[in-house]
């Protein structure tokens, strides 16, 4: 009904039928679609305007980036915090590589080569900055010498160890796993290979170095295993076997624990107090035998993480070099008084 016709109808008291629910829902959906369309258009206009502003800045600030698209270099891609203060010289090789990667990836955004050198110098802190500052002060106005190549050479002369590669090669010959977890050890071993520049060596050479470095227990565990063809396959095999050995060592049978506990229960009450890190033993036919001690002393040794059998630190009862002690009832009688010795 048109608007001009509704006036008389309202004056006459006529009731206008309300919209049905489907019609109201349809109108609400149409309004929402129009709002969403307008919102999308506004966002697209904002993006277009921002792209034009960024393109203008890139064109004016970094003319050397004409070969790259503006969309690629609108912002820096490598979001890392680069700092080096020379408090730990071992961290310099990693910093050197990260800074070089940063300038390769984001160099066009940072600016000209001179600006990239200033960016690299800004990553140096404390002692590191003080060491390189004289070079910066001397050549900052000489564009032919104030270059990235010269800057990196100056840093490496100041912070890198010239004997690092030779030291790493020597370390490969004598480093051992010892009691270290294999995951921790292989990380150190791979780092030493990198520092020695030996990752390009033959697979057999790298495998030989690694086999000589692993623990005797791990070497015995793989003695019957098939020989891996590559160094990486050997690392995977050792990872797997090392994990299996760790799981196996944690599984101590209940019966064994009970025998270890009950075999040292009876003891005289007047034994002397044990002194830490000394071994109680007595001669036997085959090898040295541990002395019998009271249960209180055994409990004390367990609390102090010492061997329950001999009382020494550095090993436990399963690796004790002494035979188990003889119970007092099995000891010979004294000839003079008849008492048990």
Image (cartoon, grey):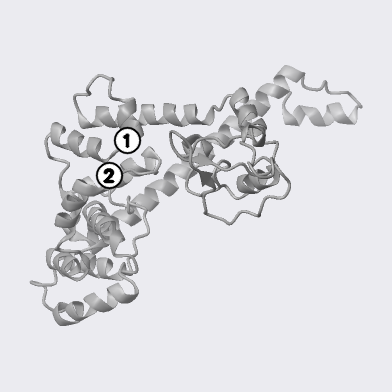
Q: Name the residue: 65% across, 33% down.
A: 261
Which of the two marks, 1 or 2, is nearer to us in this view? 1
Residue 264 drawn above or below residue 68: above
Quarter holding the C terminus is top right
Does residue 258 sit above or below 277 in this rendering?
above
Front-most of residues 274 and 244:
274
Secondary structure category for the residue under label 1: helix
Residue 254, position as x, y percentages in the image: 62, 24
Residue under label 1: 216
List the single residue furthest toward the left: 144
Residue 237 figure quarter: top left
Label whose residue precedes the other's in the sequence (1 or 2)? 2
- Location of residue 90 in the rendering, given as x and y in whole percent from the top left corner: 29, 60
Please tell me in which quadrant of the rendered image residue 200 appears: top left
Callout 2 secondary element: helix
Question: What mark, if any, has residue 114 been given in the picture?
Answer: none
Residue 30, how many percent across, how many down? 61, 27
Q: CA distance from mark 1 to mark 2?
A: 17 Å
**63, 313: nearer the viewer:** 313
Q: In terms of depth relative to the viewer, which is nearer, 266 or 139?
A: 266
Q: Nearer the viewer, residue 331 or 41?
A: 331
Crowding at label 2, few (<14), some or many (≥20) Cα neighbours within 10 Å?
many
| Residue 198 higher or lower than 101, as above or below | above
Q: Is residue 275 left or right of residue 151?
A: right
Residue 66 in sight in this render: no
Residue at image position (19%, 71%) is 158
* Residue placed furthest toward the right: 13
Against 177, residue 74 (above or below) is: below
Q: Residue at x 92, y 27 (%)?
A: 13
Q: Which residue is mark 2?
A: 189
């Amino acid at each position: 009904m048109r608007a001009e016709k509704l006036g008389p109808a309202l004056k006459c008291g006529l009731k206008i039928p309300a919209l049905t629910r489907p019609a109201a829902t349809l109108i609400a959906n149409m309004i929402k679609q129009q709002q969403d369309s307008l919102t999308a258009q506004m966002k697209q206009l904002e993006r277009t305007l921002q792209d034009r502003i960024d393109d203008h800045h890139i064109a004016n600030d970094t003319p050397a980036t004409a070969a790259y698209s503006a969309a690629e270099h609108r912002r820096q891609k490598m979001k890392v915090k680069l700092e080096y203060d020379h408090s730990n010289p071992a961290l310099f090789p990693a910093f050197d590589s990260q800074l070089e990667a940063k300038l390769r990836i984001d160099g066009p955004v940072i600016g000209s080569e001179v600006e990239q050198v200033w960016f690299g110098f800004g990553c140096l802190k404390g002692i590191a900055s003080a060491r390189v500052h004289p070079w910066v002060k001397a050549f900052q106005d000489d564009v032919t010498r104030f270059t990235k190549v010269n800057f990196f050479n100056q840093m490496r002369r100041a912070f890198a160890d010239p004997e690092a590669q030779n030291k790493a090669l020597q370390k490969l010959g004598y480093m051992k796993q010892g009691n270290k977890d294999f995951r921790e050890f292989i990380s150190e071993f791979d780092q030493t290979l990198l520092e020695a520049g030996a990752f390009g060596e033959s697979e057999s050479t790298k495998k030989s170095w690694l086999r000589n470095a692993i623990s005797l227990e791990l070497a015995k565990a793989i003695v019957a295993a098939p020989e891996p063809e590559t160094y990486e396959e050997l690392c995977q095999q050792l990872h797997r076997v090392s994990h299996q050995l760790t799981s196996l060592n944690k599984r101590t049978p209940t019966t064994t624990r009970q025998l270890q506990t009950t075999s040292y229960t009876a003891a005289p009450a007047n034994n002397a107090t044990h002194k830490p890190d000394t071994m109680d033993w007595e001669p036997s036919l085959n090898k040295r035998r541990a002395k019998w001690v009271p249960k209180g002393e055994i409990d004390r040794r367990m609390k102090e993480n010492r061997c329950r059998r001999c009382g020494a630190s550095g090993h436990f009862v399963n690796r004790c070099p002494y035979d188990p002690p003889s119970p007092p009832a099995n000891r010979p009688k004294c000839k003079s008084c008849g008492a048990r010795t």
